[in-house]
Amino acid sequence: MHLENANAKIYVAGHRGLLGSAIVRQLRCAGFQNLILRTSKDLDLRDQSATDIFFEAERPDFVVLAAARVGGILANDQYPADFICDNLSIQNNVLQAATRVHVRRLVFLGSTCIYPREAPQPLKESYLLSGPLEETNRWYAVAKIAGVTQCQALRRQHRCDFVSLMATNLYGPGDNFDLQTSHVLPALLRKFHEARVLEQPEVIVWGSGKPRREFLFSEDMAEACVFVLQVPEEELHRVAPDGLLNVGTGQDVSINELCGMLRDIVDTRCALVHDRSKPDGTPQKLVDVTRMQTLGWTAPTPLPLGIEKTYAWYQKHCA
Ligand code: GFB
């Protein structure tokens, strides 16, 4: 059942993260004030009984499951057990508890890394489970595939209105700028910034610079989540009978092209040095956004503008 009532009780799991914090801003902006928020310190979603007690007590009408262990290509490779175990626990506990208390609609956050490494581009939702995964992030991908599939099973057996959004590479204010664990965009933004400030002649870019990625501004992804909460059930079912929706811009850039944009925005002339000992990962991850377009949503923020906003935030809060 879709979100209409401004007083509906909405639980945003992971409200301190890049996406979760943006979702809270978007919901409040859209007039939804009855939000339930818990830090991971107050409620560890990996703890099944704590999660059950919380859902029994709060009985939210709607849930956005944006709580997850996430990270860039190196973090995925270095902490495989954390990525698979934490994500499996969090989503299993939340999905089961949400089913028990009859949540009206739940939005589960998937990722485009769940599609097979060599799948044709752009990636359609129907390509799920049609081939082998990318090695560097298969632990995370397997967990997310389990979550998406669990939502489908709960839809089928218990008629739960649970829908999964496959987000492309997100970036934006409040991102993780740690050079070891972050995703490529915040990492390189920081590296170019430091190169300018410290007058360094070059920036290290991991891999060949040839992989292509689709970047989506976190505020746009949050807008998409709030939009999907409000789509009537029949329409959602007609467009996405399997409960899967890709969310992206429909455009990708190579890592080298991204470097060009970042260098212009940060305003530095430093050279790129490729560290080929680091992995490239998937060659391309571009999603087919036809379903979201059919529902009436397209990403509003062009990549250069999103980077400018992120850089402004970084300079204010981190630099
Ligand atoms: O964003 P990223 O870490 O992860 O890296 P994925 C994207 C590409 O950027 C890879 C290159 O080809 C990296 O080699 N790259 C270049 C860099 N310089 C850097 C750098 O300084 N830092 C980083 N991190 N990368 C992740 C998955 O894959 O995407 C997650 O591991 C998730 O599970 C996420 O799905 C959305 O795009 O390759």
Image (cartoon, rainbow, N blue to C red):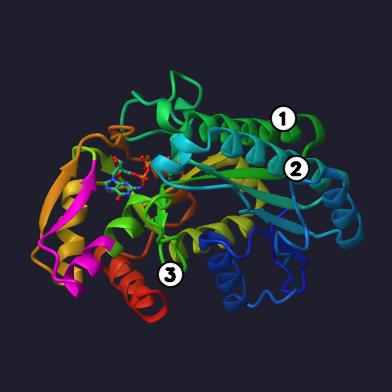
* Secondary structure at numbered mark 1: helix
Q: CA distance from mark 2 to mark 3?
A: 28 Å
Q: Looking at the picture, which amino acid does disc 3 mark?
A: Pro
Question: What number is the disc on residue 95?
Answer: 2
Relative side of 147 to 7, left or right = left
Determine the residue located farthest toward the bottom in the rendered image. 316
Look at mark 1 in the image and give the residue it sits on: 153
Residue designated by label 3 = 173
**Looking at the picture, how far across and down is residue 161, in whole percent?**
72, 44
> Where is residue 6 drawn, in percent x and y?
72, 74
Identify the magenta region.
191-206
x, y percent for residue 56: 91, 55
Q: Is residue 254 left or right of residue 32?
A: left
Which type of secondary structure does the marked residue at label 3 adopt?
A: loop
Residue 319 as seen in the image, left or right of residue 231: left
Give residue 113's quadrant in the image. Answer: top left
Q: Nearer the viewer, mark 2 or mark 3?
A: 3
- The correct choice, above or below, for 311 with respect to 274 in the image is below
Q: Nearer the viewer, mark 3 or mark 1?
A: 3
Q: Is residue 118 visible?
A: yes
